Amino acid sequence: MNLICDLDGVLYRGEELIPGSDIAIKKAVDAGLRVWFVTNNSTKTPAQVREKILRLTGYESSEDMIVTSSQAAASIITAESSPVYVLGSAAIEEALIREDLEITANHHEARSVVVGMDRALTYDRLAGAVAAVRRGARFVATNDDPTFPVEDGFEPGSGAMVAAVMVASGRQPEIAGKPHPAMQRLLAARGVREAWVIGDRLDTDIALADGNPNWTSIVVLTGVTREDEEHRPADYAVPDLAAAINLVLDQLSRR
């Protein structure tokens, strides 16, 4: 059985391990579940994600079991749509390079613009992205999450950068990350059919499973979604990852 697990707000917040999540992941793996780490965070490569999981939980994942929104964005860019201007992290650039796509720092040359989380955002780089999109370049967003959870609250997410380009260009982006088709296709290509999906965002993690009869969703309350909110369309709502894994194993044992 496949388990699709989000990271930020589920396994950890920033550099802080969510209590019990390390034990929960090991319990899932020991029980024979295939654990996929699927994240809208576009700031880290699969290798960097793997290192963080290992450092915080002690679990040594495989890079092949990690899927990021940067990879999803790169998967929908074609050779005809390059060169690509990136408003985002080096992880986005690496994902594009792995797809043999050309990157340009000159917005006049860009046929596509990919926007994601950019902690080095400058006005000039934002202006370059907007100019390219206004001239007709393809506009792709790794994801549009407005925030992401850190140790002491929330910080602006990729959606904040995407919104700036949208407002200034007057155009809507193609969104690659959860819950959109590009991410669904990446998982299907890796053989994920029947699955349990665990996440802290209803509009991304849980929506990824919505409408798929072979996927069951669990929202955890350690990230964005709060206990006092409506939890639909999630099939289940539980306090944390440890409770989610216990629920999955209990349901599987009843089959």
Image (cartoon, helix red, strand yellow):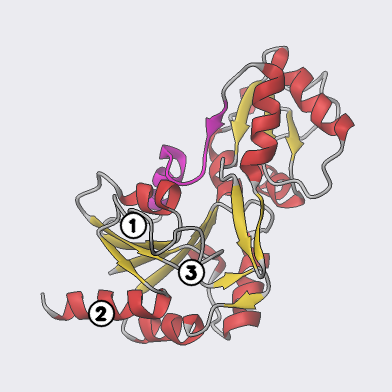
Say which quarter of the image contains residue 75. Answer: top right
Q: CA distance from mark 3 to mark 1?
A: 26 Å
The residue beneath circle 2 is 249
Residue 62 to residue 208: above or below: below
* Amino acid, disc 1: Val
Q: Does the CB distance between marks 2 and 1 fall below 8 Å?
A: no
Q: CA distance from mark 2 to mark 1?
A: 18 Å
Q: Residue at x 64, y 16 (%)?
A: 170
Residue 149 to residue 33: above or below: above
Give the class, few, some or many, for how many residues have Cα within 10 Å of label 2's Cα (few <14, many ≥20).
Answer: some
- Where disc 1 sits, the SS reads loop
Residue placed farthest to the left in the image? 255
Q: Residue at x 56, y 42 (%)?
A: 143
Select label 3 or label 1 by which is in front. 3
Question: 103 or 140, which is in the foreground?
Answer: 140
- On residue 222, the disc is 3
Say which quarter of the image contains residue 96. Answer: top right
Left or right of 56 in this view: 221: left
Give the class, few, some or many, for how many residues have Cα within 10 Å of label 1's Cα (few <14, many ≥20).
Answer: some
The C terminus lies in which quarter of the figure?
bottom left
- Is 79 inside the magenta-drawn segment? no
Q: Which x, y percent locates residue 166?
A: 64, 25
Can residue 118 be seen?
yes
Q: CA distance from mark 2 to mark 3?
A: 20 Å
